[in-house]
Amino acid sequence: MSINSEDYLVEIYRLSIKNSDVRTTDIASKLNVAKASASAMIKKLAIDGYLDSSKYSKINFTNKGYKLAKEIYDRHKLIEKFLKEILGRKDSKIHIEAHELEHVFSKLSILKIKKLLGE
């Protein structure tokens, strides 16, 4: 899966935590992309089995999509915690750095970070 696809899934997950009705316009706005671009990606993610969506309706995860989105979201939060608690980072760029790292850390590295943090 591409980083861009993962970003969409995580943003849909974040939006769904705040509001159960997630729509294409919400995602386009949050990711700062054109509505047509967001629609195309949502359609692709639906075809790939990650989302349930039809034109003009709210976007829902499939079980597969929810599991992956939550995993990526949790990985991001774990990396932010690692940067703060272990590396002592306190600057405003932690979120950006965690976003970059969430896509490159292996599952083994994530497990070791969890162990290091006592999770």
Image (cartoon, grey):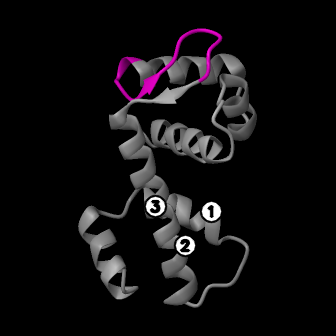
Give the left or right position of residue 27, taking residue 40 as reference: right
Residue 86: where, in percent of width, then height? Answer: 49, 89
Amino acid type shown at disc 3: Asp
Disc 2/disc 1 C-alpha distance (Å)? 9 Å
Amino acid type shown at disc 1: Ile
Residue 87: where, in percent of width, then height? Answer: 52, 88
Marks 2 and 1, the one that precedes in the sequence: 2
Crowding at dot 3, Cα within 10 Å, few <14 / some 14-19 / many 20+, comes out as some
- Chief secondary structure of the magenta span? loop
Decide: is 55 above or below 53: above
The range drawn in magenta is 47-58
Disc 2 is placed on an element classified as helix
Residue at x-position 56% and y-position 25%: 59
Q: Which residue is mark 1?
A: 96
Disc 3/disc 1 C-alpha distance (Å)? 15 Å
Marks 3 and 1, the one that precedes in the sequence: 3
Give the left or right position of residue 95, taking residue 63 as reference: right
Marks 1 and 2: in contact by CB < 8 Å?
no
Residue 50: where, in percent of width, then height? Answer: 39, 29
Residue at x-position 39% and y-position 36%: 65
Marks 2 and 3, the one that precedes in the sequence: 3
Q: Which residue is mark 3?
A: 74
Decide: is 23 above or below 97: above
Q: Which residue is mark 2?
A: 80
Crowding at dot 2, Cα within 10 Å, few <14 / some 14-19 / many 20+, comes out as many
Crowding at dot 1, Cα within 10 Å, few <14 / some 14-19 / many 20+, comes out as few
